[in-house]
Amino acid sequence: MPHGLDHIVHAVRDLDAAGEFYRRAGFTVGARNRHPWGTHNRIVQLKHCFVEILEVAEPRKIAPRAVRSFSFGAFNRDFLRERQGFSMLILGSRDAVADGRSFEASGISSSTVGTMAGQVIMQGFVGFTIPVWVRRLVTMLPAIIVAAIGLNPTNTLVVSQVVLSFQLPFAVIPLIQLTSNRNRMGELVNSRTTTVIAWVVAAAILFFNAELVWLILRS
């Protein structure tokens, strides 16, 4: 399992200027280091972790993105095309493969999907937007915390799915009511058969949720 925060990558366009900013803020900033894959960094050592100030200094050396491999340089290069800031958070690990699986089990992948889906709904239907960093923080921070403090990923996943099941009726029932309303949906309204099947599914969800609550109270 992960063993706490190792370091944070602060991607910048001017490494020396950023280093001077940290120095004026009272930190001790290390000398420039050069990576063979095209990035340069300077280290700000803290008590239990460090900040890596990173610049893409030699873009020609950066390995291209690939389907089954991660390019550190390409990721930060693309990040810097849009903004400067904290681009990566790295946790300490003794087994990266096992920890990667625990992240997936803790909901990192589903959190990403949820972030994108929520963005589409808010922008396309509600007309309301939230800054990208806020969306990522709210949706992914709980999963990162679960993996970082070493909770059992399987048990955590089960608990998260139980909590999610209680939320389903609040989404499914209004959805059925909306899509069955001819005044709102017009020619796209649900057929009678679809509506009946949908209400049966909603009733099943309510039944199983009620049974789950009963089992929890009994235990």
Image (cartoon, helix red, strand yellow):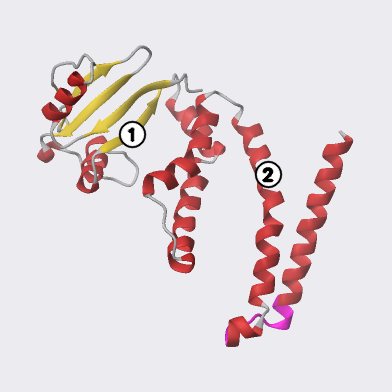
- Which residue is identified by label 2? 163
Left or right? Give the position of 46 relative to 183: left
Q: Secondary structure at mark 1?
A: strand
Which SS type dominates the magenta stretch?
A: helix
Q: Residue furthest bottom?
A: 187
Instruction: Find the residue positioned furthest to the front.
Output: 25
Question: Of the residues shown, which amino acid type is indicated by label 2?
Answer: Val
Residue 34 seen in this snapshot: no
For residue 88, which numbered disc appears in the image? Answer: 1
Residue for point 46% across, 47% down: 112
Q: Residue at x 23, y 45 (%)?
A: 78
Percent of width and height locating residue 16: 11, 27
Circle nearer the N terminus (2, 1): 1
Give the amino acid type for the residue marked by disc 1 in the picture: Met
Secondary element under disc 2, as helix, strand or loop, is: helix
In the rendering, at what x and y percent does residue 48 appear? Answer: 38, 13
Magenta segment boundaries in residue numbering = 187-194
Left or right: residue 38 versus residue 208 is left
Position of 73 with respect to 112 (left or right) is left
Does the magenta run of residues contain 191?
A: yes
Q: Residues within 10 Å of mark 2 (few under 14, many from 20)?
A: few
* Residue 7 on image: x %, y %: 34, 23
